[in-house]
Image (spheres, grey):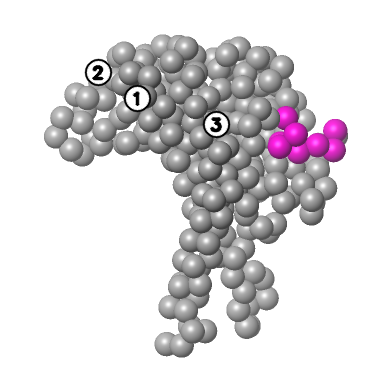
Amino acid sequence: MGESGSNGLAGQYFDAAIDLLRTVRDTQGEVIAEAGTLIADTVAAGDRIFCFGAGHSSLPAQDTVYRAGGLAVMNLLAVPGVVGVDVMPATLGSALERVDGLAAAVLDTSPARSGDVLVIISLSGRNPLPVEMALNARALGLKVIGLTSVAYADDTKSRHVSGTYLKDHCDLVLDSRIPVGDAELAAPGIEAPFGPASTVVTSAVMQAVVATAAGALAERGIDPPLLRSGNVDGGHDWNGRVMREYADRIFYRH
């Protein structure tokens, strides 16, 4: 099959994703290091870590929670009807991202407190929910790490009443460098662009931040609270010990 066939498009997609990963590695390394250090500081201080994303932006957040090879203290800040695409109808999740006041209600009823860190993932960063989540979190004394595509602030209009974006209300901003529209491919006979790469890139950024945090803790002589796979011998016993030790900072189990 030629370059215009499915194999050719698959190769183009991989090339595009690899190019984006290289770009993020080369341009965001310093901020990734800062984000990892901030998370390590927070763990060392006995405070807590939360992650939030809406819709498909929730996937990289979820990928860090209760994850083999990840930090046990990463917690998902869940917003009912928004985290994931299992809500019916699926369009409801998108509608809820534009509801004013939802972020404040979620934070006010969450265990998050001053001194904690909240990672907010939003590709566009233009909807009221991530913007207000960042605003309210900082008002409560949390440190906010935003993971977004800064390009959207140049090419789209904010949907928040303030006219601002997620990037405007963060202590640290990680730029995923995803082009507006999140579609890497185009082909004759296909009217719409396709091949989104934001999940690949954003998940890699999140894992790079967590890896940096683990390394920063180890450099201070603190054994990072990493989880092992439950599918390897001894994994469950290891994880049980870590969860008992850090029980006051883990909110995804009773």
Marks 2/1: CA–CA distance: 18 Å
Residue 197 is tagged as: none
Q: Which residue is mark 3?
A: 34
Q: Earlier in the sequence, mark 3 or mark 2?
A: 3
Q: Earlier in the sequence, mark 2 or mark 1?
A: 1
Q: Quadrant of the C terminus?
A: top left
Reply above or below: 23 against 233: below
Going 44% across and 40% down the picture, which residue do you hit? 207
Going 50% across and 72% down the picture, which residue do you hit? 12
Identify the magenta region: 162-169
Q: Position of residue 22 (x, y in %)?
A: 51, 56
- Residue 80 in which image quadrant: top right
Which residue occupies the foreground of this view, 207 or 19?
A: 19
- Amino acid type assigned to the residue bearing label 3 in the image: Glu
Q: Which residue is mark 1?
A: 218
Q: Position of residue 59 (x, y in %)?
A: 50, 43
Q: Earlier in the sequence, mark 1 or mark 3?
A: 3
- Amino acid type assigned to the residue bearing label 2 in the image: Arg
Number of numbered discs overlaid on the protein picture: 3
Q: Which residue is mark 2?
A: 241
Disc 3 packing (10 Å; few <14; some 14–19; many ≥20): some
Please say whether residue 108 is one of the residues in the magenta stretch.
no
Find out whether the residues at labels 2 and 1 contact each other: C-beta distance under 8 Å: no
In this view, the residue farthest toward the bottom is 2
Q: Quadrant of the N terminus?
A: bottom left
Marks 1/3: CA–CA distance: 16 Å
Q: In the visual, does 239 lie left or right of 160?
A: left
Q: Secondary structure at mark 1?
A: helix
Q: Nearer the viewer, mark 3 or mark 2?
A: 3
Which residue occupies the foreground of this view, 92 or 121?
A: 121
